Image: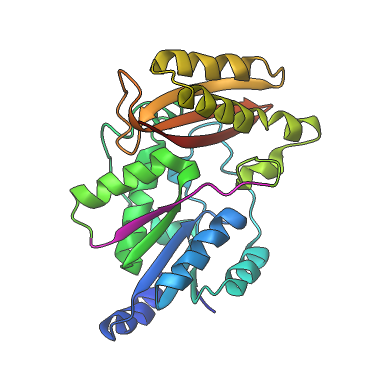
Amino acid sequence: MLIFKKVEEIKKYLRPQQQAGKTIGFVPTMGYLHEGHLSLMRKAREECDLVVASIFVNPIQFGPGEDYDRYPRDLERDRKLAEEVGVDVLFVPEKEELYPPDYATYVEVERVSEGMCGASRPGHFRGVATVVTKLFNIVRPDRAYFGQKDAQQAVVIMQMVRDLNMDVEIRVLPVVREADGLAMSSRNVYLKGEERQAALVLYRTLKEAVELVRCGEKDPEKVRQFMADRVAAEPMARLDYAEVRQWPTLAVPTKLEGQILLALAVFIGQTRLIDNMVVEVP
């Protein structure tokens, strides 16, 4: 596996590969890899000639008081895991490589970035869209792989790719979970003691809400309130949001039909966790 830190160096390596007709699969990450990331890399390995992954904790998608400085980092561990699942090229730029002192350009995706995490984390999706645009321009992948756990992020990126006529196919793969149902996240490492058990309230609540919808509930507000009440019953949990949206448009439905996204963001102690499930309503 090759490792590049400089934009010009990775471009110099990748361009001849593309000119030779090789398909490139790309998995952008912030590192501290877990099975969710690795599942994306395995899928890229199945579908593409060359697999590129990036590890970059993107400062401009973190707001004031968020966990940029303490976000878990372990490059040597990540390098081994990426190599084991067949990544060919790892891109690990420094902050100054992507954002030099005179940096002044940002990408903003409207509408689908509003509400949900967009309301809770102002500027977050501007940071995500900007760094993903830069990475796509550097790598020029044929396919890029994202997890459904970050559902709104995936929709923002799909919208951006359509609107800006980017030549990349976006693949969104299912949420990967721990044995007890907790959605895999690099931030799970923050959960201490009883917090880890309390975090299961997200999975339990979503499963119960899916069952409520399958049993015939058609009122989005009743489902949303059901989720909020279930989270409120967990003493260690603080609700950020409970949302019911159409999938994948993220439109707010007036009644439940078609594919419906049930989404939660919950603080367990100081750790903010997100999770979601999609349910098909006839």
Q: Is residue 140 visible?
A: yes
Residue shown at 61% from the left, 20% from the top: 231
Q: Work out which quarter of the rendered image holds the N terminus and state it.
A: bottom right
Does 70 appear above or below 25? above
User: Viewer-proximal residue, 278 or 159?
Assistant: 278
User: In the figure, is residue 85 to the left or right of 243?
Assistant: right
Residue shown at 32% from the left, 23% from the top: 252
Question: Where in the figure is residue 186, as x and y percent of width and height?
Answer: 62, 48
The span shown in magenta is 167-178
Question: Where in the figure is residue 143, as x and y percent of width and height?
Answer: 34, 64
Does 52 appear above or below 264? below
Residue 86 belongs to the span the image colors magenta: no
Residue 177 belongs to the span the image colors magenta: yes
Question: Where in the figure is residue 67, as x and y percent of width and height?
Answer: 59, 39
User: Viewer-proximal residue, 106 or 175?
Assistant: 175
Residue shown at 37% from the left, 26% from the top: 115
User: In the figure, is residue 15 to the left or right of 122?
Assistant: left
User: Viewer-proximal residue, 148 or 8?
Assistant: 148
The colour style of the image is: rainbow
